[in-house]
Amino acid sequence: MAERLIGIIGGSGLYEIEGLEAVREEAVRTPFGDPSDRYILGRLHGRPVAFLARHGRGHRLMPSELNFRANIFGFKVLGAEWIISASAVGSMREEVKPLDILIPDQFFDRTRTRVSTFFGDGLIAHVSFADPTCSILGGILYRVGRQVGATMHRGGTYLCIEGPQFSTRAESRIYRSWGVDVIGMTNLQEAKLAREAEICYATMALVTDYDVWHDTEEDVNVEAVVKILRQNVETAKAIIRAAVAEIPEARKCHCAHALRDAIITAREAIPTHVKRNLVALVGKYLVE
């Protein structure tokens, strides 16, 4: 397996970070198909990092077209132990304003058509997902975000919808009544799969709008989202640059051994091809 590294997933411009050295691209093949794009590898503050454009360079893939399994499996194959996710969201709270950044610690699923697990086909595992993000990584992002001058919010619920359409006004008002904090279309599946892959995962939710519940703001539209997002991405790059230097070499969180007690299938009953395909995830637990 390649050198351990820090993964970053977000927009295609995210890897244009000052100080990134020894840059190269690598295509990764997985049992689940191709990731969204080639991974951009390099070193930042001396630490190995890998960037992936979530929607492909040029933003070619809709949220429901993303091959989440391939994206996360690719990071695992490259040796990632941490993934920092950055994505645009709408705010469902008055005090969480456009250009703010929220570090969610919970997710709520409103998707319908997405595969969210590496398991099945003769190998069953049930990982704990009560606390779906890594509190250590989330804490680092929050702390360094404040240090670089961003308006940060720690904790909250990310509601993940199917998309690609934005919410109706009725949906937005109902979601707000549920007490969620931000709304997006991509991060839930990443968090589930990262947990199964025993990778620490945390989200920087980059607030671009108030969805459509806010009576005094313009309805969300792509032009407005992109305008705000460009500003947010610059802040996100500053946070990533600072966070990479703060991430510990050794992990002491439960993310690192999420599968230890999760596999319930009898070892002798697991099909050979499944063991082969998932060796990067479960190989250490199947040793006789």
Image: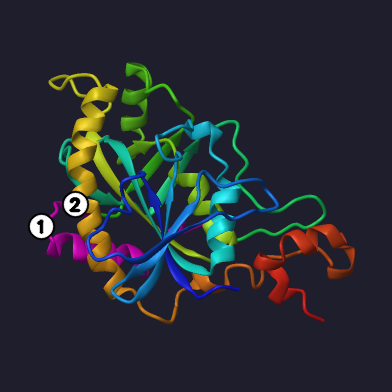
Which residue type does callout 2 highlight? Answer: Thr
Q: In this view, does 113 lie to the left or right of 282?
A: left
Q: Residue 222, image x and y in percent? A: 29, 24
Q: Nearer the viewer, mark 1 or mark 2?
A: 2
In which quadrant of the rendered image does the C terminus lie? Answer: bottom right
Q: Residue 259, image x and y in percent? A: 63, 68
Q: Which element carries disc 1, helix, strand or loop?
A: loop
Q: Which mark is residue 235?
A: 2
Q: Where does the magenta region start and end?
A: 129-153
Q: In which quarter of the image is residue 127?
A: bottom right
Give the residue drawn at x 36%, y 30%.
175
**Do the residues under discs 1 and 2 have CB atoms within 8 angstroms?**
yes
**Residue at mark 1:** 149
In the rendered view, would you say 140 is above or below 248? Answer: above
274, 135: nearer the viewer:
274
Q: In this view, does 113 lie to the left or right of 94?
A: right
